[in-house]
Structures are given as structure tokens and as C-alpha cells.
Amino acid sequence: MENYNKLNQLIGWIVFAIATSVYFLTLEPTASWWDCGEYIATAYKLQVGHPPGAPLFQILGRFFSLFAFGDLENVALMINIMSALSSSFTILFLFWTITMLAKKIMKTNSEDKLTISQGYAILGAGAVGALAYAFSDSFWFSAVEGEVYAMSSLFTAIVFWAILKWEESADQRTGYRWLLLIAYMIGLSIGVHLLNLLAIPAIVYVYYYKRYPYSLKGFIIAGITSLVILVVIMYLIIPGIVQLAGNFELFFVNTLGLPFNSGTVVYFLAIAGLIAWGLIYTRKKSKVVLNTVILAFLFILIGYSSFFMLIIRANANTPINENDPKDAISLLSYLNREQYGTWPIFYGHYYNAPIVDHADGNPVYMKDQKLGKYVIKDDRKGTIPIYDDRFMTIFPRMWSNTKPAHKNLYKQYGEIEGIPISVPDGQGGTKVLYKPTFGENLTFFFRYQFNFMYWRYFLWNFAGRQNNIESQGEINHGNWKSGINFIDSMRLGSQTDLPKSMENPASTRFFFLPFILGLIGFLFQLNRSKKDTWVVGLLFLMTGLAIIVYLNQTPLQPRERDYAYAGSFYAFAIWMGLGVLGIYNALQKRMANKTLAAGIVVVICLVLVPGIMAEQGWDSHNRSGKYSASDFAKRYLDSCEPNAILFTNGDNDTFPLWYVQEVENYRTDVRVVNYMLSSGDWYVSQMGRKVYDSDRLPLTIDQDFYKKKGSYVPVFERVDDAELMDAIKFIKDDNKGTQVPLQNGQWIDYMPTKNLSYKVDKEAVIASGTVAQIDSAEIVDEIDWQIRQGGLFRNDLMLLDLIATNNWERPVYFANPNSHAKVLGVDKYCHLEGVVYRFKPTIAKDFINKIGGVNADRTYEVLMDENIRWGRLNEDDVILDRESDRNSGMVKQNYVRLAQALLAEKKYDSVVAVLDRGIEFFPHEKFPFDYYMMSWADFYYQSGAIDKGNEMVMTITNRYNEDLQYYASLDDKFSSEYQSDIQEAIAVMQRLIQITKQYKQNELADEIEESFYANISTMNLQ
């Protein structure tokens, strides 16, 4: 085939254009949930995001943001386009990778020429495999949002393609340049994500097979070498370069008395000098391999140098500056992700292992500008637990001891009976603990970590997906589903005639076709080229099984983790492409016209695999009309008065707010304080600075205390109670009269009581507008609460300090008042205003435990604003995702609570308007039902809107009737999985009967009652 190379280039770019068009058409136009808001905000202004950082992503994101040409609302779109292009270039390199591997299979030696039919089959294989991966669930999801995984996939694709290009030109004089390109790409990829490093073993084996004759010894040495290279980069170069810089810095500053950064400068000059000397020496001595190794090391460092951006920007004190990595010492902690803790991988403890002692950790240093040296701010003494040796094991899979729910699920998935071991009970006696057996440990690994956290995701991509509801193991949430009913029904129960509540527009059915095609490709390659099969298989295993082992994930992950295994799915896509060759090879033996055989196979495979995947996945991946994260963030900020302080907690009530403030300059007068991040001294320091239109936080305790002594302040009850400001001053006071000694002779500050009171300055309350003069009689004299834990962490102390110091000058809001209840249990003083809760010295009349009361006037003003928007989630072209649904549930509750508050004021027309508006934004056809849906009907009835109440009752009744009829149709082993849903449906219908009778809707009540008892009879329930 004379024009093969031209066609290979042309079709590759056509595939690229198809992928690019699809991603552009389905791209989210703004920031999405989770880390996207943070990544876009930090990229736009080159700020410092969460550890371990993604500086190259941010630098390139900043470049793409310039094409917004000053339109701030298009900044996110441009950065999302960067992800889309990264993804479509990944598809391009995947196409060329498949065609290179396919060509090796079809050509028995380099002198053979491809026939026309072989050429078409190879090019078709590349198109099928590349497009199938382009439309795979996990990859498509990452392609249309501003996250790092799309760009990380691109680097994996480039390095794997590059080693195959090296293989083609290895015998040429300039072939080594491909190896240097790979080294540079690996270095650059560190500035995006470390997943790319997992391609190294496959790369090493390509090199081995090309340079050396096969032998078992050589095969083993190549494997060991690949792991050594991987370990050297991950654990020596990445942290080691920085750690040595930190050691130099400490020696030059603390020992030699030189200025800050002097050690770092000398260190990097020394590295540059050693590299230069090594290159000159190896060139003179003609040591080509060693010269190439040194050059590769240099190129890795050049790529890795993107992290200098983080240090430069951290020293600029950017508004987002997570962990504040201003020097080599703090950068090491940042790279090691120390704030997230560690977990065992190859050897460690079981979840119920008793702690028998503690070891010391590495001290944490900070700059002391006054002393001109680094001082210890946290000695980390006694911070590393030492566990009972009897509870230690190799390959520990069940290790988390922080949450009771983890332990329960370990027992469930591991089917634990355990081995009884007697241990001290801490009171002079003994107790029996049941140590899991190693077999039970492996059971958990296979059932949860492999099956649930990997194989389920694998089949999402290559068999089909049940729905987009986040799963914690439920039979009706987030499972794989092929579309072949007799297979699906064996695992999930009947999947025909599903009730509307289980119909999900994100459901996909691939009928196992991608999986079967990939399996054919694997077997065909294995038969034709065992070496290449091992290379692709190693990429598959290292980006799949190896990640499973390394992450060692606990149950109850906060979100689905399929994105972590995209590299594994990439490798399988190679086999999908080669599956086309396998089918062609079988068919061409039976057809005289082999070109026709190639055409038939390629067309059929294109239609049945990427064609079906694209058609099935379009709706669930089309985010072109979705604005939920940014809209919800704006509603949070709109709910706040000017110059407010808003406490948030997790990623999804923080990162979208960062995005709209940092990128769109929206409500920059509101200071967003992430309560979890406030446990870091660096974050408290940043809160002590003015940012944009937001003043610094009012705090009494100085920053030096928060840095050196504020990580934990224990409570020792020396007095019955204390006024809050007195307690804050007591902690701040640096003398031994306000401290207690420890056994090691150290004196520490403490909180002298658990019972706190806050005397209310009524004049300040009225002057600040916190409470209107007309309502002054409602202001309490004092707010009392109790600390419900044994001590105060830094964020707890900062919160109490702020409340005491602020004295009502600035409005204080909480995204969730219950999240701080152990330290500041004042939820009855928290009033819902819009979608946030304002802390005010008045007791809420309609107070509900843990969620405060409602300021009806202010909440009505926010929720009923004519310009309000909730991400267009009510529109037909927008598919509801899990995180939008979760946040919508809280907003729906706010509409109901507002209606309830208005009912108390007998504003019936307003109640109906509020309920109507809530249904308009969150229609029942799209949003899941729950027990509290009955409140909507009840409030309609109470407001005199009988017809609307009846309509709501019938909507709820029909939905639960359908559900109960479906449950009744299932075998017992499946219906038992729905027991909580069945109980909810029964309780709702019983309550609906009561409500309709209460409001004299007797015919409707009789109708519901009839259907209720019919369902009870069908299900044999009492």
C-alpha cells in the first residue's frame, strides 16, 4: 500500500477532528463541581492550589485563559477547551499507537509491504480503537471539564507513542532523541499528575525487546530496572531534589548563619555544575549510554522546574495559596501531601490494631524573620502511632481506624469472623479483639478494592452503566449494566419495565460489544506478538491493578474514582483497535475480495462499538447547557450581606465560590473561610490579610501563636464556665499561670472550661444592622453553649476567636451550622437567609435542631428573585448529575422551610408562590423523591391551594405505587435489597392518606388507600 503513511496521517487528524468536535459540542461552559473551580481559579491568576500541585496545568491554563479576551465568564470555557484539546490529542496519539502496533502484527518483517486490504484494516483498527476510547464514559467525562486528568492522559499517550517511534528508529544515529523526548515529557507530566509515571515499565520493556535478545534472566532484569526507574523518579527525584535543597538551606542558614535562600541557591548551582561536568566528561570519553542518562535526568529536571512557579507565586501571597510553599522546606511538605496523612501499602496494621506506643515524626520548620533562621513550629513528637505487632500484616487492605462506618464495611466486604486475640483494655484488665485473617483481608481486596472500585468502572466503560447515581454498594445505584437483560437481571433484578424513579437518562447500554472487541484484540495480539502483548498488558496493569494496590482505598469514598484508572482503559482501547484486525483476519480467509472484507469489518465495528458508545453516551456527557456549580456559588454569595464572613466546609461549597470570586470578580467583598483548611496555620495567616474588597478577619490571638502553638489546645476544666473573650485572652496569655506542664517538662496553653458564654453587646448589634431597632427586644443578653470535645484544633480556636473579636461588626454566615456544633453549638441562633445561615443574637422562632431557623423576609428576597437561576437544571437539555442533585436537595429544603415560615405568618399567597417556584426550578420529573415531599402537598393544602395539593398528592402516590409494584415483581433476594425504600414508600402513602383525610379530600384518600392495601397484599406485608 504505497500511500499508507499519508493515509495514516490524514485519518489520524480526521479522528482528532471528530473527537475535538464532540468535546467542543458537549463542553461545560463554566466551572464544574469538585476541583474544577479551584483549578480554573488558580490557573487564571497563577495561584497555588491543593497539594501536590499542578503548576504546568496552571501555566497552560493561564495561556488558554488569555483567549477569553477580557470576558471573565469565558475564562472557564477557555480552560475547559484546553482539557478538550488535551483529550482529542490523546485520541490522535492513540490512533497512531494502534496503527503502529497493528502494522507490526501484519508485517512479518520490515521488508514486507502492506497490501491494500491490510492497510485499510490497520487504519480502521486505529479509528475504531481511538474513537471507542474517545466516547468511553470516564475519558469523555474528564474531556469536558477543567481538571488535570485530560492533560495527564495526553502525556501518557505521548510517551507510549514516543517509545514506539523510538523502536522504529532505534538503529538510527538520532534515535536516542526519542528517549530524551520521553524524559522531558515525564518531567513535564509531574507538573500535571503523577499517573503518567506508570507508563515507565512498559517503556522499559519496549527498550529491552528492541536492544536485547529475549531470556528469562533479561526479562526479570528489565522488570526490576523498570521498577527502579519508577521508584527513583517517584521517591528520589521528585521529593529528593527538594529535600536535599531543604537540608542545604537549613545548614547554610541555621549553621553557617547565611541569609535565607542561600543554601537553595548554592544547591541548585551545584546540581547544574555536576550535570555540566557529567555531560562534558561522558562526551569526551564517548560514554553514549551514560551521557544519554544524564541528559534524560536533565530533561526530567527541566520539565519538573514548573514547580518553581508555585514558590514564586506563594511568595507573592496570592489570595489562594494552599500550604504556602514559599521555600524548599515547605515545598517538600507540599509535595508529600502531608496534610492528607499516610496509609500503608505493603506492610501495616489492621483497622482494629491497638496502639501500644508513639514515635516521633520529622519536625516542621518555619522562617523566623526576627532571628534570621528557621525555627521548629511543630516538633511532631509522639505523632506516629506504633501498633501491636500481632495486628500487623503484609499487604494490609483493611487499615482505616478513623471512622466506625469504615470498620463496619470492612466486616461486610471482608466477611470477617477473625481470630480472637486478648489485649489490654486500658483499665488493668483485658478484652478480646478479632484480628482479620489474611484470607479475609484478600476477600476485602477482591470484593471491594478490585471489584467495586475498579472492575465496576471498567465495565461502565466497556459494557454499560446503570445510572450516574453515586454508589456505596446499593443494587440500584451506579452499577455496570450491559443492556442484555438476562445477564443484568442475575445481578440487579429485572431491568425491564423499570419505574420512572429508576429511569435514568445517563444509563448506557453497550451490550458488552466494546469488551468483546477488546478481548478479541488481546487474544489476537497474544497469538501474533507476545512481546507487544506484554508491553500493552503492563501498561494496562500498571494503570489499573497497581493503582488499586497503591491507593488502598477505604469504603465510603466521597465520589466515584473511575478517573484514576483512565490509563488502564486507554490500554484496553488499544486491544479494541486490534480486535478489528482479529475479526478481519478471520473473515479475509473466507472471502476472495480481501479489501471488501476489510471494509465490511471496519464499518461494522465502527457502527457497533464507537457508534453505539457515542449514541448512548451523548446525553449523559453533554454539559453544554449546565451552569450548576457557578450558579449555586453565586446564590451562596448573594445570600450574604456586604463585607460578610462565610464559613464553608467541603470542596463543593468552597471551590465554586473561589471560582466566581477569583475569575468572575463576583461578590469579592465576602470573605469565604473554609473551616477544614483553617486547621492549617498558613490558612489562618492568609485570613489575616485583606483580599480584594474583603477586610482581614477580626482576630485577637496573634498569628505567631496560631503558627507555633495553636495546632491543638486541650480542655482542662478548671472553672465551671467562662465568658468567651476572657477564655480567648486566657489562651493567648503567654505565662505559666495560664498553662499546664506535661510529663516531658513542656508547658502548654489550654482552655479552662467546656462551658462558654458570649455576652451580647446590644448597641453593637443594632449599630451593625445585625438586628433592626424595631426587633431589639428579641436580642438575648447572653449566648451559652458547651464545647463537646476534648480540645480545640486550630480551626476551632480561630472560629471562637473570630466570634469573640468581631462583636457583630461583620455579618457571620455558615453554609451548614451543624458542622461546627461541637465547638460552637449555637444552631438556634442561626437563621436561614437565602441558602446560608446567619449567626444572630436572637432565638429563631421556628428553630429546628441542627439546622437553625428561617429569616423569612430575607430568604424570600433571595429565593424569589426574578433573576435567580439554579444552573438550568430544570431544562430538558441538561442531565442531572449526582453533585448537582445533592446540592439541589438542600435548596429544595430551603424552599420548603421558607414556605413553612410564611405559613406561620399566614402569608398564604406567598407560600403558594414559593412552592410553585421550587417546583419550577426542581421539577419532580427530574429530581428524586423523598419522605419530605409530603410537606409540599401539606403546605399547599394549608394555604388553600387544594387543587395543587391534590395534584402533588397524586404525583407522589403514582410514583410510589410504581415503585412498590416493581419491588413486588422481584425475587426475594433482590426485593430484600430495597427494604428501606419499601418502608419509605409505605410510610409516605400512609401519611398521604392521613393528609388527604385531614383536608377533607376523601375520594382521593380512598383511592390512595385502595392502592396502598393492594400493594400491601401483593407484597405479603402486614
Image (cartoon, rainbow, N blue to C red):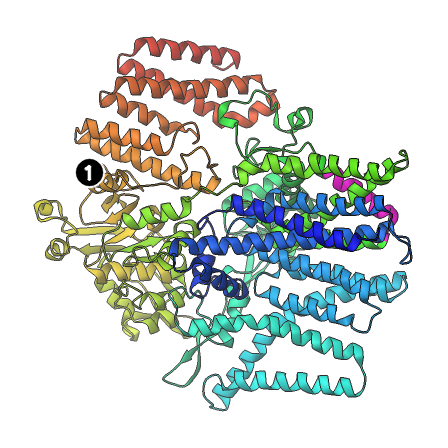
Q: Position of residue 7 (x, y in %)?
A: 75, 51
On the image, the x and y values in percent for residue 444 come to 65, 44
Q: Kindly identify the amino acid type of the residue bearing the numbered disc 1.
A: Lys
Q: Point out the stretch of residues depicted in magenta.
A: 515-530
Q: In the figure, is residue 761 to the left or right of 981?
A: left
Q: Residue at x 62, y 41 (%)?
A: 452
Percent coordinates x, y for residue 79 in the rendering: 49, 56
Q: Quadrant of residue 997?
A: top left
Say if 720 sits above or below 864 in the image: below
Q: Is residue 294 magenta?
A: no
Which residue is at a point 50% across and 53% down the rendered structure image? 80
Q: Is residue 528 magenta?
A: yes
* Residue placed most toward the observer, 799 or 1022: 799
Where does residue 367 sit, x and y in percent of width and height? Answer: 42, 79
Callout 1: SS? loop
Q: Quadrant of residue 853?
A: top left
